[in-house]
Amino acid sequence: MISIDLLQKGEAIHGSSVEKEILDYLANLFQGSKKLPVNTMEWNITYEKLYINGKEVPCRAMPYTRGHVSGKVGDNILAFPFPDHPFKVKDFFKYSLSVNAEGIIFYGDKLRRVKVSEDIVKVPTVTTTSTLKKGDEVEIHVDSWLRNTTSYNVEYTVNEGEESIVIGAHVDHWLTGFHDNLLALDVINGLKGLKLNRKGLKFVFFSSEEGPKCCTGSSQYPKKGIFASIILDALYPNRVVYSSTPDLWQFANYFRLKRIEMPTRYSDDVSFVEENIPSLTLYNDDLIPFYHSDRDLQMPEDLSYIEELKLALIKMLKALDNVKREELDERLKSFGFSKRELGS
Ligand SMILES: [Zn+2]
């Protein structure tokens, strides 16, 4: 399996050499694919260390923080249990900056990396699996830098057509990233034998979804001639959140659904939706407890889930192949929309 092969390469931070190795692997696997350059940034961590009461404990630095500090929890250092939703980390981070914390620690049962800023912030912020209490003596050391670099999106044309359907997935990932987003690569590989009769079909592997801004790779992918995009991101057995422009809602019943919703601002569909292209992202927020952690790893249910998604996508693609843009425009209007837009 591609996902298990690539898991061995370790963390693939956007713009890094590991990300490029993964893209090379895919370009090799999908012979004849094109590499489309992407201007991105690499975040490189040279050093991440945490000492609690003189003892070194495992930690991971939060993107994109750096700096060196020593002090006491509840004094110049603030420590929080990792919140129940990773998106809330930012709120604790902002609060800590507002009260001039010099170092920030999130503790829980996993090591995690959750972006707290789009630029370097010189307040070292880490996650750890050691519980902290008020008065603990702490030292945090993080050296990291962001630099401009070039990476690329890999585009493989399964069959040509006047207009094409894109199936896309990002390859960069924080920590183990098995479900976010290596598993998607096996789902896409399962569609290799498919040929559409009317429309073109392209597989696109995106660079730099995770940063420095959301969806850096896909936002630079040329959208001309794209009929629709289907993005696979953070899939997790055994259901999907069907996040799409309303004109694609009628295909949702091919999938085992958690819910149907409007497109979000957090995945590679953003730039497609902004260009008024019918777009679907499949994900599953049941992944939340493992999201961006060192424990997002393979599990027995993955195999049947990949197979189920593959069959559902084949049905959807065959149906979509027979649909005209005017029909989708009409469907969109029937829900009261004049153009395709992101949800709130
Ligand atoms: Zn993702």
Image (spheres, helix red, strand yellow):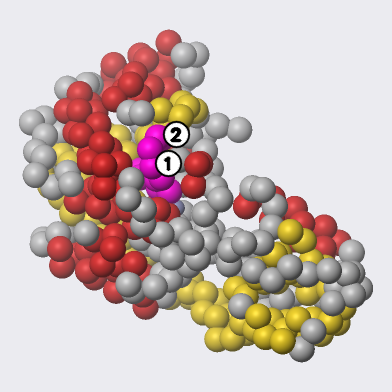
Q: Write the residue at 15% across / 63% down.
A: 29
**In which quadrant is the N terminus drawn?**
bottom left
The reply, left or right, for residue 173 in relation to residue 190 is right
Of 258 and 330, nearer the camera is 258
Q: Residues within 10 Å of mark 2 (few under 14, many from 20)?
A: many
Q: Are marks 2 and 1 in contact (CB under 8 Å)?
A: yes
- Where does residue 148 sit, x and y in percent of width and height? 48, 75
Q: Residue at the far bottom: name it.
A: 54
Q: Which mark is residue 241?
A: 2
Q: Which mark is residue 229?
A: none
Q: Is mark 1 within 8 Å of ligand 1?
A: yes
Q: CA distance from mark 2 to mark 1?
A: 5 Å
Q: Write the residue at 50% across / 65% down.
A: 294
**In which quadrant is the C terminus drawn?**
top right
Q: Is residue 262 above or below residue 44?
A: above
Whether residue 26 is in magenta: the answer is no
Q: Which amino acid type corresponds to the residue marked 2 in the rendered image?
A: Val
Q: Write the residue at 10% across / 62% down.
A: 31
Q: Write the residue at 34% across / 74% down.
A: 9
Q: Which residues are magenta?
A: 231-241
Q: Which amino acid type corresponds to the residue marked 1 in the rendered image?
A: Tyr
- Secondary element under disc 1, as helix, strand or loop, is strand
Residue hosting label 1: 283
- Secondary element under disc 2, as helix, strand or loop, is strand
